[in-house]
Amino acid sequence: MDEKLMEVLKIIAPGTPFREGLENILRAKTGALIVVGDSEEVLGIVDGGFNINCELTPARLYELAKMDGAIILNKTADRILIANAQLVPDPSIASFETGIRHRTAERVARQTGELIISISQRRDIISLYYGDSKYVLEDIRVILSKGNQAIQTLEKYRSVLDKVLNNLSSLEFDDLVTLADVTKVLQRIEMVLRIQKEIEGYICELGTEGRLLKMQLEELMANVREEGVLIIRDYIHEDLLAQKEEESDKLDEESIAEEKTEKIEKERDKIKKKSREMIAEEIIDELIDWFSDDLLSLSTISKALGYGSTLNVLDQFITPRGYRLLRKIPRLPMPVIENLVQTLGNFQRILNASIDELDDVEGIGEVRAKAIKEGLRHLRDRVGLDKYV
Ligand SMILES: Nc1ncnc2c1ncn2[C@@H]1O[C@H](COP(=O)(O)OP(=O)(O)OP(=O)(O)O)[C@@H](O)[C@H]1O
């Protein structure tokens, strides 16, 4: 579902007075033609009508729809501005609709870029026209049942994802991860994110009726994206990271003056740390976009991480930097994790470091060093236990 449609659906979501008015018109079978927006383009093609300028209530909208002609609302659809208006769009604009009402709606949408709603008198449907697009509203019950089905699918996918994530953790502790393991987990994460997008579309269309679905979705999606981003940060190839950092550095140079004052250097450091996170975020979004046509293949994912895409590349062993597992240790802030990874290099070295070695890292004192050791031990035990659940 595209962003524009999401916006449009929010305006007429169930629970709003506007939607209630539309449903009343639909039931009464009077038909209607409603323009949402009073831009100059719209006013330029309005002929006649009564100026009303009152707050939109379901009853008022319903009563006014009994009159011939179109109703013009403000952009946020909470005021009725004009009723009984004749719309005169440019007749040379192509329209593929048959009835005059729908033809007018399509033409006005194309000409003005506003949202036009047409309710058919004979057929029980509400059609939305925005720009060059058209969307026919479905019955809420149908969308609810689609949404519930999607949630059930998501539940299954999520439980498989939890297993593969735990399996990855276990391999990471044993230093036995291959690129294939990493790409399989990312593939699973992308599947889950894709279903999430679909359900968000339903929630948007359902308005207040989608509350329960929204709560279920939030619970099921807890941490999924974050885990994906951390996995990418753990495994993105050094060369790709360096290349992407160089690209974003160039952009920064344009925005930060060239003076080498200490403050600016610090600022730069902050941007650099932030940009690493952003690089991972970008990759995860890229993967969702690619995913829309096809099941994302493991070699495509490995390529996105900066490794080759040949088959045997997937068999190679790789060691994570450690962001994801370290993030699970309570009260260990991200800047400290960043220092750990920068100083010690990778997860195995962090795992096997002595208290003294950990103590030497910036931001870590003896107490914290012990807490890290303890945290990693707990985590390892938990990962081992979860393997058998
Ligand atoms: N240019 C227009 N400006 C304002 N209102 C219009 C315009 N064209 C049609 N309408 C409204 O649409 C009503 C129905 O027109 P018509 O029966 O030709 O449409 P239709 O597309 O067949 O719609 P339906 O599916 O509801 O029958 C008109 O009575 C009028 O209120």
Image: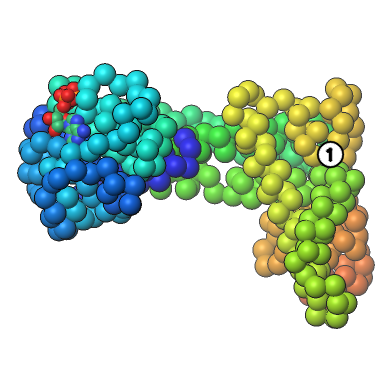
Of residues 115 and 301, the one drawn nearer to the viewer in this rendering: 115
On screen, 203 above or below 335?
Answer: above
| SS state under label 1 | loop
Asked which quadrant contains residue 326, the reply is bottom right
Q: Tell me if I can see residue 387 in this picture.
A: no
Colour mode of the rendering: rainbow
Q: Residue at x 77, y 73 (%)?
A: 267
Does residue 183 appear in this view? yes
In the image, is residue 169 above or below residue 371? above
Residue drawn at point x = 88 percent, y = 40 percent: 318
The residue at the point 19 percent across, 27 percent down is 120
Q: Amino acid at mark 1?
A: Gly
**In which image quadrant can residue 353 be found?**
bottom right
Residue 189 location in percent, x, y?
Answer: 63, 37
Give neighbour class at mark 1: few <14, some 14-19, many 20+ (Cα, 10 Å). some
Residue 388: x, y in percent? 66, 36
Q: Is mark 1 within 8 Å of ligand 1?
A: no
In the image: residue 1, left or right of residue 160: left
Q: Is residue 263 above or below residue 385?
A: below
Q: Position of residue 271 (x, y in %)?
A: 76, 65
Residue placed at 68% from the left, 56% from the top?
328
> Is 294 on the left-hand or right-hand side of 207?
right
Q: Quadrant of the C terminus?
A: top right
- Count of picture labels: 1
Q: Is residue 20 left or right of residue 182?
A: left
Where is residue 94 shown, x and y percent of the image?
A: 38, 25
Residue situated in front as seen by the camera: 33 or 23 = 33
Ligand 1 quadrant?
top left
Which residue in the structure is indicated by mark 1? 306
